[in-house]
Image: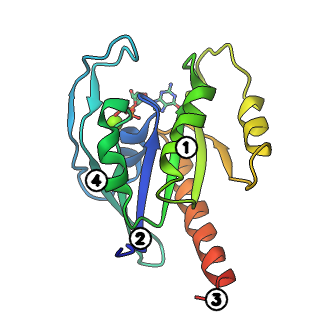
């Protein structure tokens, strides 16, 4: 498998903010594949990603990072592993305002950890009403064998999304230096 050292994947639940995160950060016009959302039971937003989002950011040190967005809807799960092939890491975004937020957290983790274990979690929509408590995500992580970074962000804010990119890149450098590469 070819490793793309600067390929980052945005995964996670429908409406969590994957497309918004890429839009907020990309230096180039984002390639999107949005279509009218026919799954109004799952989420009442107008558009949803049905293929891939692609954007790019050039970091301060001149490194160009490719930002790849996946569709959140489960009916597109067949594309998830294709988009994730060779990526440096995955950012899993979860919509905290959704009733199924902790089930989503578990579901997207199980699906994406298979292709890449360099991953971090970012909880979005924390400014909206939710019956769930944010501690549920920490509890979930503390029950895993490996500890994953967890952030609470607004996917529309570029500084929040940049923090995720920086964390994922640092995490990957640490694991490469530990493995002696
Ligand atoms: N209030 C609030 N809105 C947010 C936040 N993050 C993203 N949004 C908005 O949520 C809506 C859905 O975001 P998208 O980026 O389309 O979600 P997505 O993850 O790409 O969803 P799919 O493509 O359907 O899987 C957009 O209107 C975003 O601007 C947040 O933290 N708070
Ligand atoms: Mg999208």
Q: What secondary structure is marked by label 4?
A: strand
Q: Position of residue 181 (x, y in %)?
A: 58, 88
Q: Disc number at residue 54?
A: 4
Earlier sequence position, callout 4 versus callout 2: 2
Depth-wise, is mark 1 or mark 4 nearer the camera?
A: 1
Q: Position of residue 29 (x, y in %)?
A: 23, 52
> Do callouts 2 and 1 mark residues in contact (Cβ within 8 Å)?
no
Earlier sequence position, callout 2 versus callout 3: 2
Q: CA distance from mark 1 to mark 3?
A: 28 Å
Q: CA distance from mark 2 to mark 3?
A: 19 Å
**Residue bearing the label numbered 3:** 180
Earlier sequence position, callout 3 versus callout 4: 4
Q: Disc number at residue 110?
A: 1
Residue displayed at 57% across by 16% down: 99
> Do callouts 1 and 4 mark residues in contact (Cβ within 8 Å)?
no
Q: Disc number at residue 6?
A: 2
- Is residue 62 at all visible to an observer of this figure? yes
Crowding near the residue tagged with mark 4, few <14, some 14–19, many ≥20 C-alpha atoms within 10 Å: many
Q: Position of residue 44 (x, y in %)?
A: 37, 14
Q: CA distance from mark 1 to mark 4?
A: 23 Å
């Amino acid at each position: 498998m070819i490793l793309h050292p600067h390929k980052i994947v945005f995964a996670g639940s429908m409406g969590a903010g994957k497309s918004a995160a890429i839009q907020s950060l990309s230096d180039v016009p984002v390639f999107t594949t949005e279509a009218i959302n026919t799954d109004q039971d799952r989420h009442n937003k107008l558009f949803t990603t049905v293929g891939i989002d692609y954007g790019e950011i050039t970091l301060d040190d001149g490194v160009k990072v490719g930002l790849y967005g996946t569709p959140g809807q489960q009916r597109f799960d067949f594309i998830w592993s294709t988009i994730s092939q060779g990526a440096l890491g995955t950012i899993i975004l979860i919509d905290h305002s959704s009733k199924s937020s902790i089930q989503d957290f578990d579901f997207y983790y199980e699906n994406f950890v298979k292709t890449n274990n360099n991953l971090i979690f970012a909880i979005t929509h924390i400014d909206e009403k939710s019956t769930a408590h944010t501690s549920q995500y920490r509890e979930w992580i503390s029950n895993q064998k490996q500890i994953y970074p967890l952030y609470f962000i607004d996917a529309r804010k570029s500084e929040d999304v940049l923090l995720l990119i920086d964390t994922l890149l640092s995490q990957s450098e640490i694991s490469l230096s530990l493995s002696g590469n």
